[in-house]
Amino acid sequence: MHTIAWLILGLPLLSATCIHLGFKRNQGLSTIIATSSALITLILSLVLLGNGKDTSTAFTWVGAMGEHFKGIEIGLRIDQLSRGMLIVVTGVGFLVHLFSLTYMKDDRAKARYFCGLSLFMFSMTGIVLASNFIMMFIFWELVGLSSYLLIGHWYQKPSAADASKKAFLTNRIGDFGFMIGILMLWGITGTVTFSELELWSATPAPFNATFLGIALLCVFAGAVGKSAQAPLHVWLPDAMEGPTPVSALIHAATMVAAGVYMLARFFTSVDLEIIAFAPQTIAWIGGVTSLLAALMATQQDDIKKILAYSTLSQLGYMVMAVGLLNAQAGVFHLFTHAWFKALLFLGSGAVIYACHHEQNIWKMGGLRKKMPLTFLTFTIGTLALMGFPLTAGFFSKEQILEAALHQSTPLFVIATIVATLTTFYMGRLLLVAFLGENRSENSHHAKEVGALMLIPLVTLSVLAIISGYPFVASALSPLYEQVGFHFGPAFWASLTALVVGGGFAFTFYRNAETDPLKDKKIALVFRNKFYVDELYAQIVRFGQDCVAAIVHFIDELLIGGLIVGGCSRAAEGIGKLFGRLQSGNLHGYATLFGLGVILLIYITVFVP
Amino acid sequence: MASLNDYLLVSGLLFAIGLAGVIIRSNIIVIFMCLELMLAAASLTLVAFSRFNVSSNGLPDYDGQVFVFFIITVAAAEVAVGLAIIVALYRARQTINVEDLTSMRG
């Protein structure tokens, strides 16, 4: 059992090390190593799932010192949550490796790419299996690193290099909060290990509830960064500069869900009834993010950007569900979302590949006839994302709406609006990109992609349908809790959202040549992402100006004026003073000499 | 017979005249002569002290007078050097007026 778990963690690291140190020159061998390591970890994860026993293993990394510091462990925790999440990570991971074989076929730095993927798989399994917050934080930073490397894979493009930097720096802000949160939590509970947190929560020592709430919010800041919640959401759309399979794996299915996973881990360990304000804040941040992102998604033209904003919006959904103290619903949505969003991204990857790296949906069109299988799988993914009845998304979205309905009416309204908008922008994407007529040369010459790309698409589309059904979900999904289905307000709300959103999309975008809403003022705001990027640029510029002014003041006045300049001026002044004595006038010298002599005589004679 | 005080008074007067001349006059040769005057005043003091410092055997202490001989000799050499410098200065600047010689001004 434990060996398998350590193997799952270690194999991708081994693969990354081998590729990086040994086989970088040998592109073919590198891809084989990385892909087979992904396949083996998937099989091992399935074995772990089949075994189904909760266990944990650990070794001491930093020994105990004194009575308050109990030491830090590197440990693996295997329970329903981590087993299910492992399936998501290794499953999507393997399919993405498979897809990349074709997608990155002509890339010259294939070895570096697959090395990055392996490193990411290692870091992500580390987060999933981590038994304590410190270890999770280490792997948390590692996924940040591998995300940085993979976004910037085409570093020759300035936009990709900028995007990777932006992603890394934005994540740093959140991670800083995360670290403070972990330390505060450590201070309150005296432990960072999840199992010990559970024990502490069962019989808590007296503590300050507000303090714990703030600690929770600080920990949540880490999730805000990694899961791209407002106000740190700006990096995710830019991260689409990376290769599309990377977007599917990291920026749709797994890494961005790490925040939700971590929150679920936390919320299932600690009883949070007493500090209601913190989960409520979390729920509202999630709700607001999902609404803003859905609004922004309605006016994007880049196929990947639309999906990126949709990811933001769905992550907001999950965070909202976790904040509403229904981690089961959030994680269930994470599980289904991982499959259908990976499907959508890989589908868009296939489209982009077929259209010779054209990403603007207005330059596609008519792809339904050119790529029928891709179209079919993409449609399934879209339906699942919309929450169409009997697809996976329907079940998980239903649970979230249900949770919102019971806890907070305003959030339920927001969730319903978001569901409507989701249907609207996904309908727009489908109608514009796949239906209608070819609108450019690239889409005219598009043809169906090869089998290696279709296998992941078909597999994922099957999962996008069946992963929501109880018989699959109860086996695979992390933290699944079967909820009796009933035709309540949540069902009708989601159905209305589907009909209204779909209807609007159909009216506006059926056979549309350009976006009919393009010139509306409000559309311009959505298109420009509520000017958040511009606002941040202004804030950064203003902050830099302030710091620059302070530094300038110190440099000019204190250092230049007082210290360096002061020394030189003092020397100069004293020199001038004595220079005045050097009059060059013999009479002056003689007078001084005379006075000196008189003074000497006076001193020798009259001073006792 | 004149007392030590008289000698010292004369010597002080001579020195004061010399110093005044050095300070006031601007002709360098006059200044030079005034310097010699001050030197003479110092010599006079030495001689006077020597004459009035009588030791136990009734003879004055001649050390001071020997010293004065040295001063006179050295002064003669000094005058030779000093005048040579003044001549060289005049050749270079065509002036022996100290007010015109201010190139050392700081």
Image (cartoon, coloured by chain):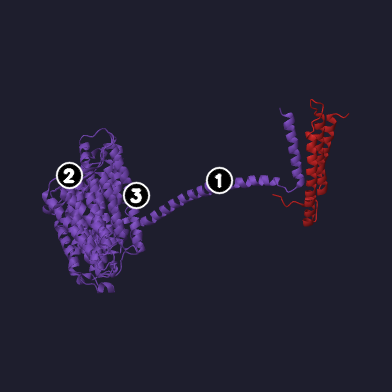
Chain colours: A purple, B red
Horizontal and vertical percent for residue A151? 30, 59
- Is residue B11 shown above or below A219? above
What chain does mark 1 sit on? A
Q: Nearer the viewer, residue A14 or B1?
A: B1
Mark 1 or mark 3, earlier in chain: 3
Residue bearing mark 3: A173
Question: Which residue is at the front of the view, A187 or A471?
Answer: A187
Residue located 82% across and 32% down the image: B48
Nearer-N-terminus badge (2/3): 2
Q: Is residue A331 left or right of residue A50?
A: right
- Which quarter of the picture shows residue A58? top left
Task: From the top left corner, tell me how far across and down residue A451 is, in percent.
Answer: 17, 68
Check whether the beta carbons of the residues at disc 2 and disc 3 lie within 8 A of each other: no
User: What amino acid type is highlighted by mark number 1?
Assistant: Leu
Q: Are marks 2 and 3 on the same chain?
A: yes
Q: Which residue is mark 2?
A: A56
Mark 2 residue type: Ser
| 1 or 3: mark nearer the eye | 1
Q: Which residue is mark 1?
A: A562
The percent coordinates of residue A136 (x first, y second) are: 25, 47
**Kind of element beneath mark 1:** helix
Q: Secondary structure at mark 2?
A: strand
Q: Image height check: is A353 above or below B32? A: below
Q: Is residue A489 visible?
A: no
